[in-house]
């Protein structure tokens, strides 16, 4: 099993309909969720919810309750010039995103005009309590649809596995 207090996580998205229409990649690292299926998450205490905008290369970290507030103190560009957001003493102590040591990538394929983007986030978790963070993500297009499209559970969220906040 893998785990550590700090790691880099990659989240990706694509928009097949038209170039430059991918507007966000969302991710959640949630204590809640079944280890195999992800059912039961993302939700609950200890949530680390973010939105990445590939058009502006900006990461938005939500408040500790995932209330969709995205305080200005929890916003940063990704990569050079980025700042740490979240962590102890902030509006979201559940995780710290080290934006300066994170990276992003975006391309538009010529043949299909498909926008493909990803963001690799350097995320640090609290040392205590020792828990698994269940990883969920989805991307959203300018047209309002979430990719991949799902009908069961939390529409749009795809379960990606889990990560311990300490070495196994």
Image: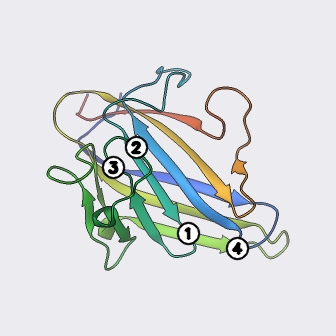
Mark 1 neighbour density, 10 Å: few (under 14) some (14–19) many (20 or more): many
Q: Are marks 2 and 3 in contact (CB under 8 Å)?
A: yes
Task: Determine which residue is flagged by label 2.
Answer: 66
Q: Quadrant of residue 66?
A: top left
N-terminal-most mark, 1 or 4: 4
Residue at the bottom extreme of this rendering: 81
N-terminal-most mark, 1 or 3: 1
Q: Residue at x 82, y 63 (%)?
A: 17
Q: Is residue 141 above or below residue 46?
A: below
Q: Quadrant of residue 129?
A: top left
- Label 2 – label 4 distance at C-alpha: 27 Å
- Label 1 – label 4 distance at C-alpha: 9 Å
Task: Determine which residue is flagged by label 1.
Answer: 54
Give the secondary structure at mark 1.
Answer: loop
Observer-side mark, 1 or 3, equals: 3
Mark 3 neighbour density, 10 Å: few (under 14) some (14–19) many (20 or more): many
Residue at the right extreme of this rendering: 111
- Label 2 – label 3 distance at C-alpha: 5 Å
Q: Residue at x 80, y 76 (%)?
A: 110
Task: Determine which residue is flagged by label 4.
Answer: 20
- Label 2 – label 1 distance at C-alpha: 21 Å
- In the image, 66 versus 80, the foreground residue is 66
Q: Is residue 162 left or right of residue 110?
A: left
Task: Determine which residue is flagged by label 3.
Answer: 63
Q: Residue at x 52, y 20 (%)?
A: 36
- In the image, 10 versus 133, the foreground residue is 133
Q: Are marks 2 and 4 in contact (CB under 8 Å)?
A: no
Give the secondary structure at mark 3.
Answer: loop
N-terminal-most mark, 3 or 4: 4
Observer-side mark, 2 or 4, equals: 2
Give the secondary structure at mark 4.
Answer: loop
């Amino acid at each position: 099993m893998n785990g550590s207090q700090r790691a880099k996580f990659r989240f990706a998205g694509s928009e097949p309909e038209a170039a430059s229409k991918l507007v966000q990649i969302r991710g959640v690292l949630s204590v809640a969720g079944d280890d195999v299926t992800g059912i039961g998450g993302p939700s609950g205490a200890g949530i680390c919810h973010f939105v990445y905008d590939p058009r502006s290369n900006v990461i938005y970290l939500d408040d500790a309750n995932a209330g969709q507030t995205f305080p200005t103190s929890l916003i940063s560009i990704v990569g050079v010039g980025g700042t740490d957001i979240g962590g102890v003493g902030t509006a979201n102590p559940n995780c710290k995103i080290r934006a300066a040591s994170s990276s992003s990538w975006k391309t538009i394929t010529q043949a299909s005009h498909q926008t493909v983007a990803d963001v690799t986030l350097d995320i640090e978790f609290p040392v205590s309590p020792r828990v698994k963070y269940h990883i969920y993500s989805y991307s959203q297009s300018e047209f309002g649809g979430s990719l991949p499209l799902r009908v069961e559970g939390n529409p749009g969220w795809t379960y990606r596995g889990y990560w311990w906040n300490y070495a196994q």
